[in-house]
Image (cartoon, rainbow, N blue to C red):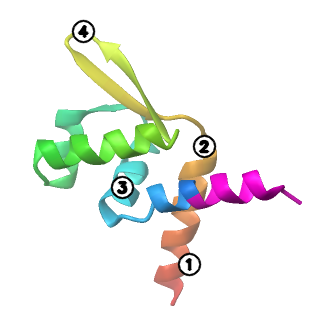
Amino acid sequence: MPGPDGYEAAGELLRALSAPLRIRIVTELAGGSRCVHELVDALGVAQPLVSQHLRILRGAGVVRGARRGREIAYSLIDDHIARIVADAVSHVREG
């Protein structure tokens, strides 16, 4: 059983995933790394909004950025996050 710090960290992770757009970003990144402009195109939202949510996900240790020329490609830190999000979406769709 995780100690108090483990529960606190899990709560922080779930808070970082609490916004629908962040869930969509994680779902998109589950298919591989993407630059901001690719996420903007795929999600149909403004670039500043995507960047703001990526900053939160990065701060929570969900995504990382790697320079790709003049751009930064974002990817999930590990597959656990993608599975958590996929399971949550699947659960809701099942009713």
Q: Are marks 2 and 3 in contact (CB under 8 Å)?
A: no
How crowded is the residue under tag 1: few (<14 C-alpha within 10 Å), some, or many (20+)? few
User: What is the x, y in percent for residue 54?
Assistant: 33, 42
Label ID, residue 8: none
Does label 1 or label 4 sit earlier along the sequence? Answer: 4
- Label 2: state its secondary structure: helix
Q: Which residue is mark 2?
A: 79
- Is residue 4 a member of the stretch shown in magenta? yes
- Is residue 5 a member of the stretch shown in magenta? yes
Tell me where the magenta segment starts and ends, as one range.
1-11
**The quarter of the displayed image where residue 64 is located:** top left
- Label 3: state its secondary structure: helix
Q: Which residue is mark 4?
A: 69
Q: Which residue is mark 3?
A: 22
- Label 1: state its secondary structure: helix
Q: Which residue is mark 1?
A: 91
Does label 2 or label 3 sit earlier along the sequence? Answer: 3
Q: CA distance from mark 4 to mark 2?
A: 25 Å
